[in-house]
Image (cartoon, rainbow, N blue to C red):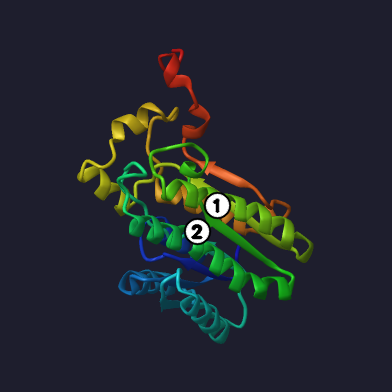
Amino acid sequence: MSLEGKIAIVTGGGMGIGEAIAKALAEAGADIVIGDIQIEGARRVIQEVEALGRRGLAVSMDVSRLEDVDRLADETLKAFGRIDILINNAGISQLPLSIFELPVETWQRVTDIDYKGTYLCCRRIGQEMVRRKSGSVINIASIIGLASAPLVAYGPAKSAVIMLTQILACEWGPHQVRVNAIAPGYTLTPLLRGMIDRGERDPRMILQRTPMGKLVEPEDIANAALFLASDQARYITGAVLPVDGGFVADGAWAAYGGYVR
């Protein structure tokens, strides 16, 4: 799958899933812009992108701030002249707390980054794509946007990302701008590893619910993003692709004693 000559923005591309996506797109021929609040990580990944022979740009920004999103778009257009691909990956999670226990400030921050940030980037960069009548937007949602879990901020925010994806696919389809979402399962990023180390996530419980019996790797999400960004997916829009080893499909099997062997 070739992305030769394409210009791609990846938010939160300085580590984890975003880093894997940025590298995969660069290996396929795209020039990469990373917008990230952790600018040192973004610069490190851009150095690796440039080592592949691609052009790169790191922009320090917070996706929840309108002025930062405008600056990300403006600096990209100044450097490269257009935007072909937008990967809305920046996101944060939360502790599994009840609605009575979770501080409102935490709810607000998760909502601001995970949903508002995606909304603002779609709104600003989508304008450029609609104007050019070309583009691919890929929103990184979550299986927790598809299946209930005790994450009263993160889950609804990711559900909102999925609905926004479908709305914009319909709104922008006539302009030949595709909008899709990926719903990762539990992915072995530095974020998840830290949660496991602190006892905030139990990998044994996750694997019991995962038919394929292993955690997702960031490269698995990157491969899905590469496909959706490419011309091989030119007639796919409004789709939500779980990359989760069957976690969502597992549904209520556990209530019946697990799998039939």
Which residue is located at x 34 percent, y 50 percent? 94
| Label 2 neighbour load within 10 Å: few <14, some 14-19, many 20+ | many
In this figure, which residue is indicated by the disc labeled 1? 160
| Direction from residue 222 to residue 203 in the image, left or right | left
- Viewer-side residue, 195 vs 31: 195
**Amino acid type, residue under disc 2 in the picture:** Tyr
Mark closest to the chain's N terminus, 2 or 1: 2
The numbered dot on residue 89 is: none
The numbered dot on residue 115 is: 2
Considering the numbered disc 2 on the image, is that residue within a helix, a strand or a loop? helix
| Direction from residue 50 to residue 79 in the image, left or right | right
Residue 211 on image: x %, y %: 45, 27
Which residue is located at x 49 percent, y 48 percent? 156
Specify the farthest residue to the right: 174
- Viewer-side residue, 190 vs 217: 190
Which residue is located at x 71 percent, y 71 percent? 130
| Label 1 neighbour load within 10 Å: few <14, some 14-19, many 20+ | many
Which residue is located at x 29 percent, y 40 percent? 201
Residue 56 on image: x %, y %: 46, 76
